[in-house]
Image (cartoon, rainbow, N blue to C red):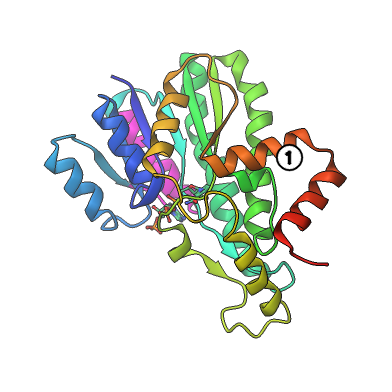
Amino acid sequence: MAVTLITGCSSGFGLLTALHFARAGHTVVATVRRPDGAPALRAASDEEDLGIEVVPLDVTDAGSVERAVAGALEAHGAIDVVVNNAGISLRGAVEDTSVGDARRVLETNVLGPLRVIRAVLPAMRARRQGVIVNVSSVAGKVAQPFGGMYSASKFALEGLSEALHYEVRPFGVRVVIVEPGHFLTCLGDNRLVADPDGVSPYAQLRRRWEVAASRLPGRGQPGDPASVAEAIYEAATTPDHPLRRLVGADAELIAALRRDLDDETFERTVRTALDFWD
Ligand SMILES: NC(=O)c1ccc[n+]([C@@H]2O[C@H](COP(=O)([O-])OP(=O)(O)OC[C@H]3O[C@@H](n4cnc5c(N)ncnc54)[C@H](OP(=O)(O)O)[C@@H]3O)[C@@H](O)[C@H]2O)c1
């Protein structure tokens, strides 16, 4: 039985991924920022008798990361799979984004995974075995207006993960970057908003963008978040899995356009398709 540690399991992909791995027979250490913050996960685990361990871990707190990882290693002797899933988003124009909010996003989405990776790697390298799955986003490939800070964090996570992949493979450790499109989770409810009062000079432009973006394929009918949990499981358990894994029709379409068009044509296509500015 493989031991899997997952961050951000109170809701969304993290919760579903914990259940998916446990149902497949993994020993799951499901970590949550707030110790009492996972009633749905605990209830589902009890109902199906899955034995999921719920452990506190705040990815912005180095001590908390080290305690959770050390506890899992002590209890189980090894961690085979780590899923860096915890994340927050921020909506708003770059100019409206305070440095404090930007720091919170980077602390969670970039330095959080870095803390976890640094905590688990010595044991993985020693065993010459392990898988690190980093949950990025299609926003880590393509930035959209009013998603600049979120994209900046996911672009950074992509770069860090790609370099890590080359560095740790010789030690027997695999890295996979999972890139979901748009799915309905609690991410939108929990996001930071750069201009909460709507008084920004960008407010009208942002509303226009939101109308345009709602016409994107997949926006009307977001995919089933369980498909992300399934993709994370496949990424973790398929030995020759590619470095990157897109999830969702919208993510596949956007990534295909980005791959197939040169920079100028891509930029023009996005502007024209979304009728964003003249
Ligand atoms: N939903 C989408 O459309 C989408 C698309 C692409 C990528 N993603 C990525 O998928 C991942 C999971 O997001 P989700 O959509 O499932 O959203 P979600 O339901 O809001 O889940 C995010 C999880 O991260 C946790 N978290 C936030 N800050 C944390 C911290 N400092 N320490 C530990 N945990 C923390 C949250 O815990 P609390 O309950 O304590 O806040 C929650 O459990 C994120 O990395 C997100 O960027 C989402």
Q: Is residue 136 visible?
A: no
Q: Amino acid at mark 1?
A: Arg
The kind of secondary structure the magenta stretch mainly shows is helix
The spot of residue 64 in percent (x, y) is 41, 49
Q: Residue at x 26, y 58 (%)?
A: 36
The quarter of the image holding the C terminus is bottom right
The spot of residue 32 in percent (x, y) is 35, 50
Residue at mark 1: C-beta within 8 A of ligand 1: no
Is residue 267 shown left or right of residue 205? right
Is residue 89 shown left or right of residue 48? right
Residue at numbered disc 1:
258
> Which residue in the rendered view is the most extreme toward the right?
264
Image vertical order of residue 40 relative to residue 189, above or below: above
The quarter of the image holding the N terminus is top left
Q: Residue at x 23, y 52 (%)?
A: 40
Q: Which region is colored magenta?
A: 56-74
Q: Quadrant of residue 4?
A: top left
